[in-house]
Amino acid sequence: MPNGCVELCFASQHFFPLHGGGTLRFLRYFPGLRQRGISARVITGTPKSSKWIDTDFTREWNRYAIGDVIPTEPVDGTPVHRIRLPEEKGWRRLILFNREIVKFCRQPGYAPHVVQLFQAIPHRSIPWLRQLRRRGISIAYAYTAPAKLPAAALKRMIRRWALRELSRHLDCIIAGSAAMGRHARELGFRSRIEVIPNGVDLKRFCPHRGSDPCRRLRASLGMDDQSIMIATVGSVIPGKGCDLLLEAWAPLAQRFPRAHLVIIGARFDPDHYQKGEFESKIAALIAASGAADRIHFTGHVQDIECYYQSCDIFVFPTQKEGMPNAVLEAMASAVPVILTPFPTLSEDLGQPGREFLLIERRPEALATEVERLIRNADYRYDLGQKGRRWVEQTMDLDHILDRYAALYRELARR
């Protein structure tokens, strides 16, 4: 057991300024972990250029050759080490990143106690995991996005074997919900699994409707106090449900001329990943709604809490998710939440019909439920308050950080 501070190396091929919910969550955790004696450093790579966010920060990346280390300033006080990775997925990208993790952990004057891996780990990473563990470093894996087994029986059997073999080199899997923990076990993981729900900053994400910042934000979108703001948060990509929401929006826009739809999240290059067809579908749905002037795409925003506090109804029609930060943040802001089912929907989110609404994944069902909330302000308020109380009781950030700090200290004793 180390005396004093525990050194945590957080390894993820993607990190800030790529705006993924999971990595942003840990970026918010790091200051609180420092207060608890957990010192974090990040090692990351460059994502595919189609996912680059256009900033002064990312424009510099093209100056570097594949395999070069990109000088990076600390992000919110957390040191970030970044390597330029190739565009294409495959062996070269994996080998470069894994080698850099080992090299980073061997640098003079740095001896991490725990490496936490984020995002999917192929079994081909085992040789590098062995090198880390031989140095006395514990390996934790944050399982945040549900993986899928192949449909073919032989491939499924091979995949399960690979995951069992990978498990032998992991000290702990951290799942964001009980459903994700069960899913990891069903896939074939045999490592220890710890379920630690996502933490929510209850001071930042709190009810504040009617404040001056909220009024200014609504006014900037053409809304006043009598308008109805329907919002969703997530990248504008297939699977997140933006198209489903726009299909439901068309009848709502006609019935409620003071309603506005606000879609908060990054939009990437439409020419990649067959998204050109998806973007064309989005454009057609917007035009067909007859209310394009009341649809707002904000892109990524820094003051996301103000958007939650300003909206009347929050909709999250995703097809695949782990433990969604956006839903927890909306609930903490006392906004009524509508979800559609996804495979790892967890009891950790509360009870459908009490803390949130769960409906079929059809535009007609979604439109009907949104209309019910629009027409009943008392119902909206009651649902929002119950969601807030649930998050207060189960997802308070301080409690979650205490659990993470205790786990890292335990792993550091290995």
Image (cartoon, helix red, strand yellow):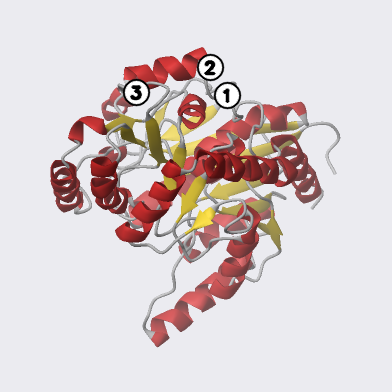
Quarter occupied by residue 263: top left
344 vs 96, nearest the viewer:
344
Q: Residues within 10 Å of mark 1 (few under 14, many from 20)?
A: some
- Residue shown at 48% from the left, 47% from the top: 99
Q: Residue at x 28, y 24 (%)?
A: 59
Q: Position of residue 256 (x, y in %)?
A: 30, 39
Question: Badge 2, how many Cα within 10 Å: few under 14, some, many 20+?
Answer: few
Residue drawn at x 51%, y 28% is 309
Q: Are marks 1 and 2 in contact (CB under 8 Å)?
A: yes
Q: Is residue 78 above or below residue 374?
A: above
Q: Which of the numbered marks, if any, corresponds to residue 223?
A: 3
Residue identifier under label 1: 208
Q: The residue under label 1 is which amino acid type?
A: His
Q: Label 1 to label 2, Cα distance in Å?
A: 6 Å
Instruction: Write the residue at 36% across / 83% down.
Output: 152
Question: In the rendered image of this protein, does residue 77 appear above or below residue 189?
Answer: above
Q: Which residue is mark 2?
A: 211
Task: Decide if residue 107 is in sight here.
Answer: no
Rendering quarter of residue 311: top left
Give the CA separation, mark 3 to mark 2.
Answer: 14 Å
